Image (spheres, rainbow, N blue to C red):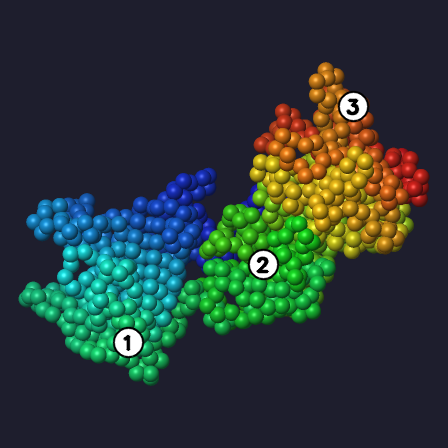
Amino acid sequence: MKHSVAIGLVATVGALLSFQSHATSLYQAVVSSTPKAGEYGSIKDALQKAPEDKSTYSIYIKPGLYNEQIIIDRDNVHFIGAGRDRTIIAKAIAAGMKGDNGKNIGTSGSRVVEINGKDFTAQSLTIRNDFDYLTNDSKAKDDPSKIKQTQAVALLLGKKSDRSAFYDVSLEGFQDTFYSKGGRSYFNNSRISGTVDFIFGNGLVIFDNSDIVARYRPNQELPLGYLTAPSTNDKQAFGLVFINSRLIKEDNRVPAASYALGRPWHPTTTFQDGRYADPFAMGSTTFINTEMDGHIYGWDKMHGKDINGESIWFTPEDGARFSEYKSYGSGASKEGYRPQLSDNDATKFTIENMLDGWQPIFLAAQNTTVKGIVSAHLMDFPAQITLSDQYGRKASTTTDKHGAYQLKIKDFIPPFVVSAAEQNTDCLSNNTLRGICMAALYAPTKPQLEQNINININPFSDLILSDTATASGYLGPQQVVSSPKLPLIFSAEEYASSVARFHQGFDNSLHDLGLPKHFDPVQYQPQWQPAFAQLTQWLWSNRNYQTKVGEVADSTLMDRFFQPLLVPDLQGKVAAFDLSAIQKRQQQVNTVPHRVFIIGDSTASNYPQVVAPRMGWGQTFQENFDTQKVQIINGAQSGRSSRSYYNQGWFRYLSSMMRSGDYLLIQFGHNDEKCDASSAGRGPYDVANTCTYPNNADGQIQAPAGQESLSFQRSLEFFIDYAKSHKITPVLLTPVTRMKTMKGKNEFTVVSTHFTKQNSTKGFSFTGNYSQTIKDTAQANNIALLDIETRSIELANTLGEENWKDYWLAVDPIKYPYYKDRAGRLDKPDITHFQEKGAKAVAKLIAKEIRQTPKLKTLSDSTID
């Protein structure tokens, strides 16, 4: 069940969102070219709604082309795209175009995106100036439509910008693509393309592991262009620095020796004695360990204006700080004017030294140690640990026998998702036994990572990740762990809401255990583990199953007795977990003479208050027994067949609580019947993961060759054999009836539906009667049988057409708004499931059947008639 945002959590969520203000990996706003409710239709609109404080404001920009010109004056803005080729911010604008004042807008005015705030970050998107430079370039000089000033900036970092970081970003243009006017900026795994001076300015910019792409210009004499034009102030130690990068050409049309590494820009500047080329602009460009293709030929000169307005030339030798270190490739050379750094000088060009104490988030996890503890009741250790970063890089290790793990990571970018899985288990599997799998989301609350990080994994961390992931477009936590959809992006609001639900539901228990206020289930310190383990031992965590796609889905959290936890009720409140009550219940369960365990499907399972009045018969079955003599443990789970109940790990949890002398009530059928491979959409998934085949009319098992376990009888016999081998009494129940009446009859007559017939598409491999198969199985194994289908049909026909809706789920959606858009309302009844009155009636029928079954005499003596 999805966990909706609880109304009663608003204040807490607000506080947590403030606490998460530096978590750049979680988004606060969504922009879409086709916006849905709650999304913005433009980046500008999203920026206008940014909080006025300095908290990080992260915007997830969905795939699309956004034709906008954007100016960002606020600190701590973060753009998260859906991929470099999928999220594109573009505008066609050039310096020679006219502004509102009728004058040319100039180079700075031609920018698509301008950053004036501090701590801006962007990732996985393209910023592109769409000015048609090549068409304009091809026009005759006297063509009046030809624009003379062709500078067209994609990204401008303004004078007030600082600590700007970019990862997996493409800046595209021709002349003057990227203009840095000041401050520090860092690019990693990015791409900058252009022709003339397409990386220029006086800022400190580091390009790490990035591609610098020289574009083709037809009908142009050599050189075609210049990669850089630095105007670095002479008092500034570093300018444009390229590390471990690649200088490549757009395609093979770009000729050899057609692009210079750079040229010195002395921008015309106003001084007291006049306006002329800035003599303090001693441009600095350095290439370190950079691959250079054959289009590179070295450095070049650039003209400026003297005090008299006359054109003068500045050569690389005239004070410019141009250098290389260990360049390689066909464009690398030490001949001519190609200054080389000494080994000693090269040591100054470390990222840490150049950035002067600032560590960009995209430089995260430089030799960082990640530690944690896995807390999960019944989980076998050592377990497999896999850490994934935002871009799919992975590191693995195993826990020790107590669930503790440690691993080192380098060059990993948060957020991190750390998963824990039992050895040799496939966490996506639904058609074989799946081991225990859990995960945790680590979203750093600082703009840089510590050298040591705690990431603990437990039922709470798994649910928080699940809630956040499903709200962010993932099917569940396991899809995040193995997602090909990169970068990983998450909703900050849902993350905060899920954490708030955790505290609302468990703060009392945490306090009782001596755990600190604001306890973080992901990042707590090791000294709190013994106390925390006293809590997690009372919990079951598991992954749901999405029938439409046949995959593991969102997570669910239950207490020891399979009551759902942290699900908001109709008023939006999360019930507090009562640890002492659970412990007392366990003591009672341990001491009563008889215990009855129920396995089955949604007709029997426990439900949270939010779906009231829906109720499973197992939820109310205890009312039919003396609590001092019998305790009922209802482990039935919605949507499960006899096969998937086992494969998805539910029986493992339930059976761990059983002992000799217990009773095991087994009721399946509804979901085992889903064997039509031709059913639109879900059919193949049902056959693969849920279906079991009934016996034929002669009582013989049916199953594909070599797959006898897919027989319904064999599937039921697994539970029977387990029970017998542990001296537990197994009891088979036929499934409750669906409210289907006999076709072609005027009178109201409910009939059996628990059988399959071949259809026109031949979708069934085998067909037959499931209730009869249950009867065959009970007889073959000499165990008690309760024919609940027959009894519930009798109940339905006794109620008649006027009254059955009071028992099955057919409610007024005004009184129960949960059913406004769902089956279960008066005009669209749910003919399978019960409301409270029906659940209690069926529970009484079962108790009555127990009293009338000689093999269950000992148990029947403790029923309440």
Tell me what residue is drawn at x 31 percent, y 74 percent. 328
- Looking at the rendered structure, the secondary structure element under dot 2 is strand
* Residue 737 in the image, given as x and y percentages of width and height: 75, 31
Which quarter of the figure is the N terminus placed in?
Answer: top right
- Looking at the rendered structure, the secondary structure element under dot 1 is strand
* Residue 774 in the image, given as x and y percentages of width and height: 80, 39
Q: Which mark is residue 797?
A: 3
Which residue occupies the extreme top position in the image? Answer: 746
Which of the pair 464/330 is nearer the observer? 330
Give the foreground label among 2 and 1: 1
Tell me, yes or no, if residue 236 can be seen here. Answer: no
**How many C-alpha atoms fall within 10 Å of the one at disc 3: few (<14), some, or many (≥20)?**
some
Nearest to N terminus: mark 3 or mark 2 = 2
**How many C-alpha atoms fall within 10 Å of the one at disc 1: few (<14), some, or many (≥20)?**
many
Pointer 3 with pointer 1, Cβ within 8 A = no
Residues under labels 3 and 1: Cα distance? 90 Å
Q: Which mark is residue 59?
A: none
The residue that mark 2 highlights is: 440
Which residue occupies the extreme front position in the image? Answer: 705
Say left or right for 563 vs 352: right
Q: Quadrant of residue 203?
A: bottom left
Q: Quadrant of residue 321?
A: bottom left
Tell me what residue is drawn at x 78 percent, y 42 percent. 701
* Residue 434 in the image, given as x and y percentages of width and height: 67, 54
The residue that mark 1 highlights is: 324
Give the foreground label among 3 and 2: 3
Tell me what residue is drawn at x 33 percent, y 67 percent. 246
Pointer 2 with pointer 1, Cβ within 8 A = no
Which amino acid is tagged 2? Ala
